Image (spheres, helix red, strand yellow):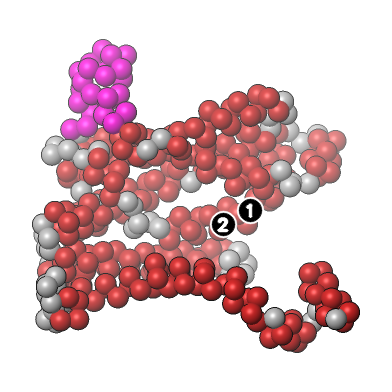
Amino acid sequence: MKQRKEKTAKVVQGKLTVVDKLRYIRANWQLYVIFLLPALLLTIIFKYVPMGGVLIAFKDYNALEGIIGSPWVGLKYFERFLSSPDFLQYLMNTLKLSLYGLLWGFPIPIILALLLNRIRRVGIKKKIQLLIYAPNFISVIVLCGMVRIFLSPVGPINHMLGTEINFMTMPEAFRSIYIISGIWQGAGWASILYTAALSNASQELTEAAVIDGANIFRQILNVDLPAIKNIIVIQFILQAGNIMSIGFEKAYALQTDMNMPASEILATYVYKMGLLNGDYGFSTAVGLFNSVINVILLLFVNKIVSKLNEGEGI
């Protein structure tokens, strides 16, 4: 009993070798099963079992016959989508919205975190954080309603400009509206991760930089940014891997008949073809195509970042 307690203490302290750890896991496997089984079951049920629905992309799906009983059509839906005259437009709309959003939106949380880190008065810092975090808790639909009101011909924006322009009918304005509203809503909340990492930055290095006469920009460049470099890289990989994963809700809520040339993306197209038109096989094929492109982009970005990071995988 005493030896078992000593082994447990060593496991907690991380002093056991790999062989000892394996022996410990084997001796206490019941505990691992109890703790891991619920999470494993939830992952299998909600993440892996639904993957069986991908078969619909290769079948002429009929709800009465089910996925297995529906006739096989092979790559028919993929050929139909790739040969569609609207394919390139929807793909480019999705890529442009994602890439511009990443280009404009990714640095903002980092800049916010760096600025917040420079505020020394705790009271003022908390009030500013409250203001910039609050938009994150606004529903997407509510946000889109606010945007429509602000940009309507009789809204406050037109009132200030002295015009009566309906910005929501302008395809060239859709991407800017979508991205800027997204930055306003999510940048503050996204900065939390960087703010937390900056709290662990070496104060000794900051003090040494001040003594050496470094200005604020030099301090940020040589002390703050290195402290959050790894988090920036990981976040960039994750966001770049989700380039094609734009949710349809916001784009659909901001969509009008006039801005369709810019607002119709793959996600809204899948929603319309699948749920509104009932063409489940075709919409599943488009969604699967979207996911494959996502995986390719994720691997590509990870490879580039690994090369830039001196060959070290992230």
**Any mark on residue 3, and which?**
none
Q: What residue type is labelled 2?
A: Val
> In the image, 115: left or right of 48?
right
Question: Label 2's element?
Answer: helix
**Any mark on residue 233, and which?**
2
Span colored in magenta: 145-169
Q: Where is residue 168 in the image (x, y as percent from the top left)?
A: 22, 32
- From the image, tell me which residue sits under label 1: 229
Q: Is residue 292 magenta?
A: no
Asked which quadrant contains residue 203, the reply is top right
- Residue at 46% x, 64% y: name it: 301
- Residue at 52% x, 40% y: name it: 189
- Residue at 19% x, 81% y: name it: 68
Asked which quadrant contains residue 32, the reply is bottom right
Q: Please tell me whether residue 78 is drawn above or below residue 278 in the rendered image.
A: below
> In the image, 219: left or right of 73?
right
Judge whether residue 180 can be spotted in this image: no
Considering depth in this image, is 122 or 294 the residue closer to the camera? 122
Judge whether residue 149 can be spotted in this image: yes
Q: Does the magenta stretch include residue 166?
A: yes
Q: Position of residue 215 (x, y in %)?
A: 73, 33
Evaluate if marks 2 and 1 touch, with contact meaning CB atoms under 8 Å apart.
yes
